[in-house]
Image: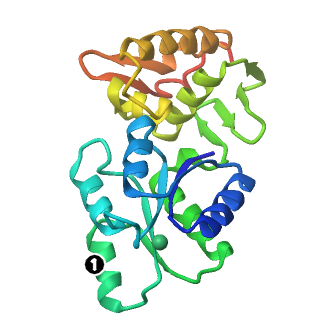
Amino acid sequence: MGRILVVEDEAAIAELLSMNLRFEGHDVRVAATSEEAVQAVHDALPDLVVLDWMLPGESGVVLARRWRTEPRTRDLPIIMLTARSDERDLVQGLDAGADDYLVKPFSTTELMARIRSVLRRRLPEALESAVEVGELRLDPATRRVRAGQTEIALGPTEFRLLRFLMTYPERVHGRPQLLDRVWGDHVFIEERTVDVHIKRLRAALQTAGCADMIETVRGAGYRLTSAPSGGCLAA
Ligand code: CA
């Protein structure tokens, strides 16, 4: 599931949110100030941020605006929380780059629904739905990958990598993008790590004759394709 950062200085709300998010299977980190939030995003890029407007020091709006201007965080999905229901605030929040907006007090059920909806739109690989490309089927709920009747055994990183590639088939992904989206943190990992895991993934896929589904695009990165014949020779 997704990595979610909760930025909220009110401990009771932060606790309630992280409890509910963990229950839904998300990996949660809490930040109580904008400095802590900046540090958390620096350590590991989350899949989504629940961002309180009113924080001690720098406000959530300022933070959202800054994230929108930086290439690494430009597409970070943000759901803003505020105690103020003023229409001008709503406009200002959305202008700052929030994807969605909730006014306190809100129901956690409502927030969970909004989070699912933003993730579905912005980051389908963070949800538990199965993906199929050609003869390949990956099910995050059971952690199984099959090509036809053949089950393919994958390590956790190769599983996440394949899941990402299958969620966006036929598109070319550069190594920095794969690091951000699959590893979640491009700060401490070298780009050639991607090549190592692609090699392992190809070796695993080859047990079902599907290694050719992963193409190297010279100077650009990698692509998963089902062309020309469903991708798998033996399945
Ligand atoms: Ca607050």
Q: Residue at x 29, y 53 (%)?
A: 67
Residue 106 screen position, x and y as percent: 59, 81
Using the image as rendered, state which of residue 142 and residue 28 is in the foreground: 28
Q: Is residue 174 visible?
A: no
As displayed, is residue 21 above or below residue 54?
A: above
Colouring mode (rainbow / by chain / secondary structure / one colour)? rainbow
Q: Tell whether circle 1 marks a residue whose Cβ is less than 8 angstroms from ligand 1.
A: no
Using the image as rendered, state which of residue 203 and residue 61 is in the foreground: 61
Residue 176 screen position, x and y as percent: 33, 27
Residue 180 screen position, x and y as percent: 40, 34
Q: Residue furthest left?
A: 69
Using the image as rendered, state which of residue 187 and residue 194 is in the foreground: 187
Q: Amino acid at mark 1?
A: Gln
As displayed, is residue 133 above or below residue 13?
A: above
Q: Residue at x 61, y 69 (%)?
A: 13
Residue 216: image quadrant is top left
Q: Is residue 73 visible?
A: yes
As displayed, is residue 69 above or below residue 44?
A: below
Q: Residue at x 25, y 56 (%)?
A: 66
Q: Which residue is mark 1?
A: 92
